[in-house]
Amino acid sequence: MYKQLASLSGLLAAVVFSAQLQAQPDAPTRKVEASSQQLAVDIQQKVDQLAAQRQADFQEWRQVRRELLLLEAYNQRQADWNQRLQTQILSLEEQLASLDSTREGLEPLLEQMAERLGEFIQHDLPFKQEERLFKVKSLNNLLARVDVSHAEKLRQLLTAYRTEVEQGRALSASQEYLQLNDQAEKERLTLLRLGRIGLYYLSEDEQRAGYWSAAEQAWLPLTSKQRQQVLLGLELEQERGLPEFLNLPLSLPLRDAAASSTEANL
């Protein structure tokens, strides 16, 4: 009987020991479990990153959408203003056939048109300003001449008006000598102009850039990142790049530009 008890005790001890071995996971199992846990952590981190990126992209889309709406509104007002100006030009051209009967009233009208053109240029973005103001001075000299017909005077004025209208529609670049502030000397700069809402300069060594602020009535510097946008704009002007948005501050805020285009009456 003692032998049977001893045998049963040994069998029971073997079963308990075997159960303990089965309860403890072996090394490969622990490694798999640790790997699964790390994978779950990595996936969660990726999900969090994607969620954050999605939120940032959404905010950027909202900003771009807002700017597009403002730009569309400005373009519409600009188109309406251009249409009214074209109507005025056509009306004046129709009067050329009856200049003999309207000669006395035409001279004050021509002088008023030249005066308004000069005032517009002085308050506009400062691009080719000396050249444009010299054109107005030449027109005033022309109006004072008695050997030039009223028809020719009116034709010259309408040509100047058309030139100003066309300059407000395009992306253009030019080389000019400008004095950026009272302490600086004049230097040769490359100007990039976006219609009449943005005017930017780039130094000859391409290391400095800035933009004209209508609110400050001064040239303000741009950051290094914005300077790259000016370079991109110059490539677009030369048709060496694909059309895309330029992330640059405006010389004239869109709301002010829209208001100016609505109220402007050259």
Image (cartoon, grey):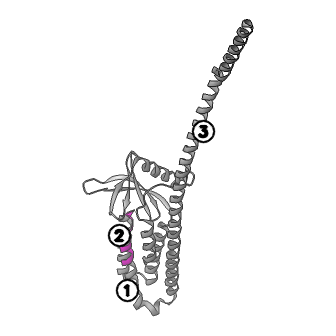
Q: Which residue is mark 1?
A: 108
- Number of numbered discs on residues: 3
Regarding mark 3 in the picture, which secondary structure is present there? helix
Prevailing secondary structure class for the magenta stretch in the rendered image: helix
* Labelled pair 3, 1 in contact (Cβ < 8 Å): no
Q: Is residue 145 left or right of residue 29?
A: left
Residue under numbered circle 2: 122
Label located before the other in sequence (2 or 3): 3
Q: Nearer the viewer, mark 2 or mark 1?
A: 2
Camera-nearest residue between 98 and 147: 98
Q: Which mark is residue 212?
A: none
Mark 3 or mark 1, earlier in chain: 3
Does residue 114 lie above or below 100 as drawn? Answer: above
Query: Going by the image, does 30 lie left or right of 60?
Result: right
Name the quadrant containing residue 141. Answer: bottom left
Residue 88 rendering spot, x and y as whole percentages: 49, 82
The amino acid type found where label 2 is placed reads Gln
The residues bearing labels 2 and 1 have C-alpha atoms spaced at a distance of 21 Å
Cα gap from disc 3 to disc 1, whole angstroms: 78 Å
In magenta segment, residue 74: no
Give the percent coordinates (x, y) of residue 80.
Answer: 52, 76
Residue appearing at x 40%, y 80% in the figure: 113
Q: In which quadrant will I find the C terminus? A: bottom left
Left or right of 138: which side holds 48? right
Which quarter shows the N terminus? top right
Q: Looking at numbered disc 1 in the image, what kind of residue is underneath it? A: Pro
Residue depicted at x 72% and y 10%? 5
Crowding at dot 2, Cα within 10 Å, few <14 / some 14-19 / many 20+, comes out as some
Distance between the Cα atoms at labels 2 and 3?
Answer: 61 Å
